[in-house]
Every structure is written in C-alpha cells, then in structure tokens.
Amino acid sequence: MKLSKSSWCSPQKPGPQKRAATNPDVGLETIEHLGGVEILSRHIPEEKDLIEQSRRYHALSDPLRLTILYLLKDQPLCVCVINRFMHLAGPRLSYHLNILKESGLIEGEYHGNWIIYSLTDAGREYIP
C-alpha cells in the first residue's frame, strides 16, 4: 500500500467511498520505510538548543517586545528613552526587557546609574 505524504500522520475520516484504516501499524511501517526512528530523530536539535529556540520565539511573540527590538535596531538606548517611547509602567517595561535579555536577544550594560540596552547578534538576526 502506497501512502501519500499528506496521509502519513493525519487521520482521515472515512468518506462515503473510503474505509477507515484497519491496521494501526501503518504509521510505524511508514517510519521504517523512511529509515526508522533513529533517522527521524537526527532532525531534532539537542534539548538545550530547543530550549533556547523556545525562549526566543516566546520573546518574539509579543508586539511590545518586538517594538523594543526595533527601537534598538539602529542604536543602543537608555531604559529611560525606551520607556518614554513605550509609555509603560516601570515594572511592566522591566518584565519585557528581562524576557528579551533571558532569550539572548538584547543585553544591558550599566553606565553609572543607567542601563543601556542594545541588540545582540542573535537579536539582529530577527530584526531586518
């Protein structure tokens, strides 16, 4: 039995002229045909890389955080300048900046009492 790529894992409801699959091992046979689970697992990055990627996507999922990244695109900025543009309460802005820092997209450097934020190389990859 030849399976199309679209039917490998997506169950199809039997239509008027289709019958439901009676063999639950069809998916396993397909995986073996592709080289087995070991071959498929080679396409999955290491867990630490998945965690890092997940943090970045989480950081990029909020419009406020994307706005901050675009603000930092051309030059490093003091938190007071970012706040003046964003019009956010201090704790809320701090929350978003911390998420961006933890994801590795921005970094902050102390200059006296001020923190100057800038994009990291990773952050530049996501902001054209």
Image (cartoon, rainbow, N blue to C red):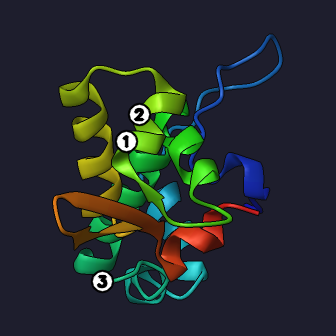
Q: Nearer the viewer, mark 3 or mark 1?
A: 1
How many marks can you see?
3
Work out whether residue 41 or residue 17 is closer to the camera in this orientation and state it: 41
**Percent position (x, y) of residue 67?**
58, 39
Quadrant where the N terminus sits is bottom right
Check the image and report above or below for 58 versus 11. below
On the rendered structure, is 17 left or right of 3? right
Work out whether residue 57 or residue 70 is closer to the camera in this orientation and state it: 70
> Does the CB distance between marks 1 and 2 fall below 8 Å?
yes
Instruction: Report, in whole angstroms, how far the alpha carbon at label 2 lies from the one at label 3.
Output: 37 Å
> Does the CB distance between marks 2 and 3 fall below 8 Å?
no
Which residue, as the protein is rendered here, is positioned at the far front?
112
Check the image and report above or below for 122 versus 95. below
**Percent position (x, y) of residue 72?**
57, 58
Q: Amino acid at mark 3?
A: Glu
- Badge 2 density bin: few <14, some 14–19, many ≥20, Cα 10 Å: some
Dot 2 corresponds to which residue?
Answer: 83
Dot 3 corresponds to which residue?
Answer: 46
Dot 1 corresponds to which residue?
Answer: 80
Check the image and report above or below for 59 versus 83. below
Q: Quadrant of residue 52?
A: bottom left
Which secondary structure, mark 1? helix
- Indicate which disc, 3 or 1, sits on the residue closer to the N terminus: 3
Instruction: Report, in whole angstroms, how far the alpha carbon at label 3 lies from the one at label 1.
Output: 38 Å
Instruction: Report, in whole angstroms, how far the alpha carbon at label 1 lies from the one at label 2.
Output: 5 Å
> Does the CB distance between marks 3 and 1 fall below 8 Å?
no
Q: Residue at left 52%, top 56%?
A: 26
- Badge 3 density bin: few <14, some 14–19, many ≥20, Cα 10 Å: few
